[in-house]
Image (cartoon, grey):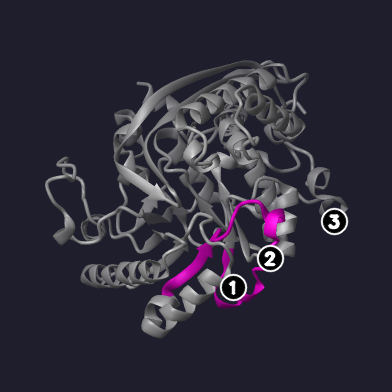
Amino acid sequence: MDSDVRIKAVETDYRYEKARTPLKFGSVVVEEVTYCTVKATVENGKGDVADGYGGIFLMDFWGWPDPNLPHEAKAAAMLQITEQYCDLVRSYAGAAHPVEIFYDLEDDLRQANLDVCANRDLSPAQPFLGALVCASPVDAALHDAFGMVNGIDTYNGYGPDFMCDLSRWLGPDFKGKYVADYIRDAYLPQVPIFHLIGGLDKLTEAEVDDSDPQDGLPNSLEAWIRRDGMYCLKVKLRGNDLDWDIARTIAVHDIGRRELDALGIKQLHLTADTNEQCETPDYIIEMLHQIRERSPECYDRILYVEQPTERDLTAQRHDMRELAQLKPVIVDESLTDLESFDLAMELGWSGIALKSCKCQSSDMIMAAKAKDLGIDYSVQDLTNPSLALIHSVGLGARLYTIMGVEANSRQFFPASTLPEEQRVHSGIFQVRRGNAATASLQGPGLGYQMDKMQQ
């Protein structure tokens, strides 16, 4: 197709970012991390040339949380994988759609992950999830460039006029079906935003003291809700301290309900995430039973629980059906490819978590498959700031998510978003009554409006 793109250049830029306050999830605490920006230059079949952009945190804390390996070593390895993936993209032969490029290079990305881990003595080899994070800003830049060079909204480039049908990846049942059949024709004007309550976060103003940042931003859940009106709250739990997890969930619910009532906001949705810390699903089953006994209203407000057990689905093959009868259980860290999607469904998981850091190309194919099969999915983030947040909110606004999109960089990395990004996309970076506004997602590509941001 004339719309297919040939890679002319791929450039990377890195900056080190410090968290405003420590972010605790699972067994790790994030205080600083590298942010990667990618610029891709492509040419289509008509000879037109354009640039596209993508960004993401190279967060080994999430992609590779192995406590036996130092953060510095893992961070350096992720940077190397990013550069090797750029080399793979630069050397891609011929012209193609970005989704085709991603899947054509998927095995090469796997091998790069194994090679870098082996060469750097990161043993055992770290999960493929980390390599997806490394590839994601490159993949996003290609999708943005694809839209830019063809003068179209990238999401309008997923139909028969621009790419092959889904049978190439999903088999003969998807012959004649396209990604475009499973996504929205336009961005939702508003998207509910999930606010994250980390394991170290303070819930009430009474807990705030002189050790907290004095920068004008809220330092407690109470104050955040009063300012932004968030009615979607994601609670990070310990997964190995049942009493604490139960009390924490109920406390978040009670504060949320009180503060939202004062704002006249009736909705309240909770999600619970232990980031793989539970030894078995039984822990969450017991937690939910006790929450239902102590606070039926809190239980009713729980929308779903997320990835309670380890990411290797083959290790224990936990059956999630009993848990799923109580609340939907969403697979996240385990979901890295179509094979893991199928295995999760076989084991009784209720739905899947999509993230821009798992690559736009993969998200599009998985979203199509999930919707076709009637499987629920969420869109979550990686504490995405800057371009990464613009991209992620846009992704959530074009898909049929369970509820909105997670966006917590305003809590933990507010300084990582550049002033010009905030100026052009104020509706995305400034949450109002729990929602982000998407009116600024305009023009070709992923809607960044880079021309305005670069003025």
199 versus 66 height, above or below:
below
Stretch in magenta: 301-329
Say which residue label 1 marks: 323
- Work out which quarter of the rendered image holds the C terminus and state it: top left
Q: Secondary structure at mark 2?
A: loop
Which label sits on residue 374? Answer: 2
Figure quadrant of residue 6: top right
Q: Amino acid at mark 2?
A: Gly
Q: Looking at this view, is 294 or 341 the one in front?
A: 294
Q: Amino acid at mark 3?
A: Asp
Q: Tell me the crowding category of disc 3: few under 14, some 14 to 19, or many 20 or more residues within 10 angstroms, Cα based.
A: few
93 versus 72 height, above or below:
above
Q: Residue at x 18, y 46 (%)?
A: 212
Outermost left residue: 210
Figure quadrant of residue 425: top left
Say which residue label 3 marks: 173
